Image (cartoon, rainbow, N blue to C red):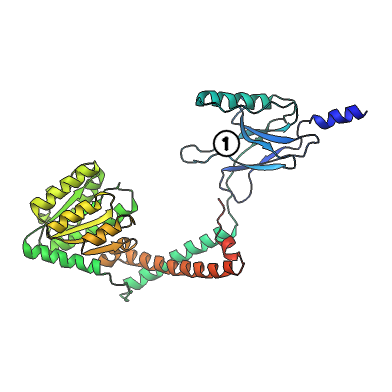
Amino acid sequence: MMLLALLAAAFAAAPSGVTVAAPPDNGGLNLTVTWKPVEGAVAYAVLRAESEASDWSVVADRLPPDKTAISDQVSTDPWNDPPKDRYLYKVVALDASSPAPPALETDAAKSDAGRTAYAAALASSPNASAAVEGRPEASLFITTPGHGLLLAMIASVGAMTFFFAAQVRQGKPIFIRRIPGIDAIEEGIGRATEMGRPVLYVPGIDELQDIQTIASMLILGQVAKKVAEYQTDIIVSCTIPIVREVADEVVKAGFYQAGFPEAYNPANTRFISSEQFAFCAGTNGIILREKPSTNLFLGRFFAEALILAETGFVNRSIQIAGTAEATQLPFFVAACDYTLMGEELFAVSAYLSQDPRLVSSLKASDYVKVFLVAMIVLGTIAATAGNDFFVRLFTIAT
C-alpha cells in the first residue's frame, strides 16, 4: 500500500476543470486559462493550437505546482497578425515521466523543429487534459480607472475645442502667446520682396504621414498665401515625391486664396532626390544659385539640418527653422536667426491663419498640458509621501 501511495505521488494525472475565457477589461488579444491543481504534479505546461489540424505550441512551461491560471496574449501585432476566431488549449501536469524540454540549437530551423516536437509530445502524453476551446473577445467597456480618466480627458478636450471655436467665430479675442520666429516669417517675406529674391521653403525629409510633415504643409499654405500677397516667388524643395505633389497643391491653393492665381509657378515646387544627401546637395545648389533672401526649414530634419543651415548662413539669408527633433535643434539654434522648438512648430498654422478650428484645438491642448503638469506635480508629492493613488489612476490597462 505504501508503494502504491509513493507511485501515485510521483506520477500526476491529467488536469481537470480546464476553462478558457476572455478576461474582463481586455482588448480582444488575451485569454485566461484556468485549471484545478493536480496531486503529484511538479510543474505545469500550457499548450495552444489554432485548430484541430494545426500543430501545438507551448505558451507556458515549467509553471510552479501552485499555479492554476495564466493569461495568454494570442497576438502581439494585431494589425499584421490579427487574432483568430478560436483557439484550443491543453494543460499538461508535468512529473518525472514527462519529456524534457528541447535543447537550444544554433540552427533556427532545427530549434523550431525541436519546439514543435516537444509540444507534440506533451499534447499526446497521458498527463495532458482534453482540448478546450477559447474565443478572444474585446470588452465593450473597459472600466479601469485609467481608462475612465482617459475618457474624461477626451470629452473635456472635445468640449473645450467646441467652446473656443465658438468664441473665435463670435469675434472674441483668444490669447496666443507671441512667438518671435513666427512673427519673423512675414518680415522675411517682405525682405525677399524688397530684394527681388525668392523665399526657399523646405518641409523636412520625412514621409507625408509624419505629423511634422503634416504641420509643415499647413504652414506652407499660409506662407504661400502671404508670398502671393507680396508678389514674390517661393521655391519648395522636396525629398519625397508624394510630398512634392501635396506641396504643389498647397502652394497653388495659397496663391488662389490670395487672389493671384496667375502668379503661381508650378516649376518652383521641386522634387530633388529621395536620397538624403543628394537632396541636401541639390537644395544647397538652389541656395547658392538662386540666392533666396529667406530660408524656411520647417518639418522633420536629420543629419542634413546643419549642412542646409550653414549654406544659408553663407548666403546671408534670413533663416527660420522649426522641428520637433531634439537632436537637430542645437544646429538650427546655432546657424539660424529664429528657431521654433518642439511643439511651437505645431502652433504656427493656428498662429498665422487664426482659423477657428486650429486655434480652438491649440487652446484646448494647452489646457490639457496645464492639467497634466499639475497632475505630475501632485503625483510627485503624493509618491514622495508614500501614496500611490496617482500612479494607479494613470495606469491604463492594455
Disc 1: which residue: 85
Where is residue 209 shown, x and y percent of the image? 33, 48
Q: Nearer the viewer, residue 103 or 317?
A: 103
Name the kind of residue labelled 1 in the image. Asp
Task: Identify the residue at image location x=72%, y=29%.
Answer: 128
> Where is residue 294, by image quadrant?
bottom left
Can you say whether 108 is above or below 29 in the image?
A: above
| Residue 258 in view, yes or no | no
Where is residue 207 shown, x and y percent of the image? 30, 46
- Which quadrant of the rendered structure holds the N terminus? top right
**Horizontal side, residue 328 vs residue 237: left or right:** right
Can you say whether 357 is above or below 118 in the image?
A: below
> Where is residue 159, by image quadrant?
bottom left
Crowding around mark 1 (Cα neighbors within 10 Å: few <14, some 14 to 19, many 20+) is few
Q: Secondary structure at mark 1?
A: loop
**Horizontal side, residue 212 vs residue 113: left or right:** left
